[in-house]
Amino acid sequence: MSRGRFITLEGGEGAGKSTQAARLATILEERGLPVVLTREPGGSEGAEAIRSLLMQGDVARWSSHSEALLFAAARADHVEKRIRPAVEAGSWVICDRYIDSTRAYQGAQGIDDAAILALHGFGSKGLLPDRTFLLTVSRETSLQRTLRRGADNDRFEMRGTSFHADVAAIFDRIAEHEADRVRRIAADGDPDSVTRAIVEGLNDLLP
Ligand code: TMP
């Protein structure tokens, strides 16, 4: 059995990651590939339990350092129990958010990138995706889509515009510095064209 692939979708709130992850899963399944669709924080029983701790409650419930540790702990469980076994068994794992979200969101709260990567090395043996799609949208689109979704705001959505601008800037920097892994896709427009761009961006990995 040959190794599968590990694909992540990243971006700010309302970028369309979940929609595109589900569409990509369908397309790959139609091509006969075994697919695992998952998300972070969460994706395994232990990580989902940590997700509730992270998402609910007051904005100031956790310090930035505690939060970085909780995300790393959730990811370690998810990688060990679900992602790594599935990829090793030949599946294509599609994950809605992963390490770049920690680098962007916890980075925007002052946690050093090298410290985040060190925690990732310890917790998840530094597992990186084979390809990451960074979906970018304007702040206006992001706000419109989050409002339309009508969900209760989680602890991160409640933060202000300058926080989300910092998050976007860090995502852009990662994409610029790690261009082999990370493909940036403008996602303000038609979801079909975003899906096409994602599939095109996988051409070199598809069997
Ligand atoms: P989502 O399920 O809507 O994507 O929400 C997850 C929230 O958690 C989102 O606001 C981003 C935030 N987050 C982090 O701050 N760090 C992380 O490592 C991850 C995976 C998510």
Image: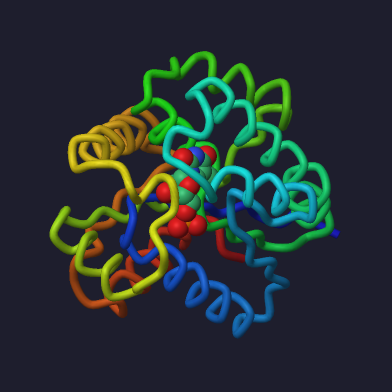
The one of 88 and 50 positioned closer to us in this rendering: 50
Q: Is residue 113 above or below residue 5?
A: above
> Furthest-front residue in view?
58
Which one is nearer the viewer's eye here, 95 or 131?
95
Q: Position of residue 88 (x, y in %)?
A: 81, 51
Question: Would you place residue 129 above or below residue 153 in this image?
Answer: above
Report the quarter where the C terminus lies. bottom right
Question: Would residue 71 appear left or right of 142 to someone viewing this image?
Answer: right
Total residue callouts: 0
Q: Which percent across, then down, holds residue 74?
A: 69, 41
**Residue drawn at point x = 65 percent, y = 53 percent:** 42
Question: For residue 194, which quarter of the picture?
Answer: bottom left
| Residue 177 showing in the rendered view | yes
Residue 105 image offset from top left, x and y in percent:
40, 35
Q: How is the image coloured?
A: rainbow
> Is 149 situated left or right of 161 in this image?
right
Residue at the image point whose x is 72% and y is 72% from the top: 34
- Look at the image and tell me whether residue 132 can be seen: no
Above or below 194: residue 85: above
The residue shown at (23%, 60%) is: 142
Viewer-closest of 59 and 131 = 59
Could you tell me residue 61's position as x and y percent?
A: 51, 34
Query: Which residue does the image show at 76% across and 54% down from the upper left?
Result: 44
Please indicate whether residue 80 sits to the left or right of residue 138 in the image.
Answer: right
- Establish if 66 lies above or below 48: above
- The quadrant the N terminus occupies is bottom right
Asked if residue 80 lies left or right of residue 170, the reply is right
